[in-house]
Image (spheres, rainbow, N blue to C red):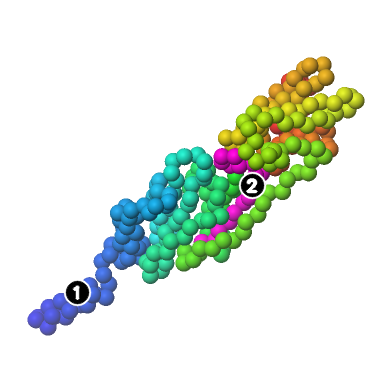
Amino acid sequence: MNKHIIKISLSVIISGFIYPAKSDFLAKKECKESIENELNNLTIKKTKKREIPIWSKDVLDINNDQKKEILITRTDGGNSNAPDLEMIFFNSKCIAKKYEFNEFTGVWNGWEGINFKTTNKGLIIYATNHHEGFFNTELKVNKVEYLFSGENLYLLSNRNQKEIKAISEIRTSNLKFNAPHYTKTSLIYDLNNDKKEETISCTYWDRWGRFNKCLIQLEDNYKIEMNFNPKRIGVLKNKKNGWHLLVIDINEKYFYNPNSKKYEKL
């Protein structure tokens, strides 16, 4: 009888030693302690001089490996620069690694503008940069992809969108540096092949490095107002309804609608 009690007791002790509680095992597997430590460090750490403050911290398992990542957004709250994005992730030993997404330079709505795609090589983290800001006349849109394996994270690709070639165009980047607000720029072209030239004119919006108040002036004093604020307007070789198509910025096409007597998005 006593021998059986001793055996049962030893079995319980050994099994308890070899097989810890399920909740403890999951906590270690999910790196809960490491995540809490990193979150505490982010909370108590003081912002250094010229360092952009943390705006938000989101804890999510973005690659479904049962270990959550910490998604960090840094911004000063203004709209002159897009937020800086960072991530703290944890390897199989729960060691924290911090990664700064230096190529996400124009994702204006932060992590809400980031997309995720699962592949057999890992999780692709991707977004499209739109380069905007004070006096920024650069017309550039590029798609950036990172690959996250759960253990490592690296840049996969950075590709610029190609512009549609125009036969004639105006763009804010051709203006003089620090051109004054409301500087007027014009493009003269026969848009409808009636042997009469139309004038596309815009004023400069220095706050965003874009054109605004764009319109087309016809010879009979009729004006076609356009409701977009581009960095570039170009005339394309292709036509529709007898009028040349227009290209706005990189590749947006507009056509003349004779019913509304306006240029509308194709």
Q: Is residue 3 above or below residue 146?
A: below
Q: Is residue 215 left or right of residue 30?
A: right
> On the image, which quarter does residue 24 sit in?
bottom left
In the rendered image, residue 112, in percent from the top left (x then y), is placed at 49, 45
Most extreme residue toward the left is: 2
In the rendered image, residue 143, in percent from the top left (x then y), is placed at 62, 51
Residue designated by label 1:
12
Q: Which mark, residue 141?
A: 2
Residue in view at x 32 percent, y 57 percent: 41
Q: Quadrant of the C terminus?
A: top right
* Residue 248 or residue 65, whichever sits in front: 248
Is 137 one of the magenta-colored residues? yes
Residue range (magenta): 132-148
Is 24 one of the magenta-colored residues? no
Q: Which mark, residue 58?
A: none
Residue in view at x 44 percent, y 41 percent: 77
In the rendered image, residue 180, in percent from the top left (x then y), is placed at 63, 32
Q: Residues within 10 Å of mark 1 (few under 14, many from 20)?
A: few
Q: Is residue 28 above or below residue 200?
A: below
Q: Residues within 10 Å of mark 2 (few under 14, many from 20)?
A: some
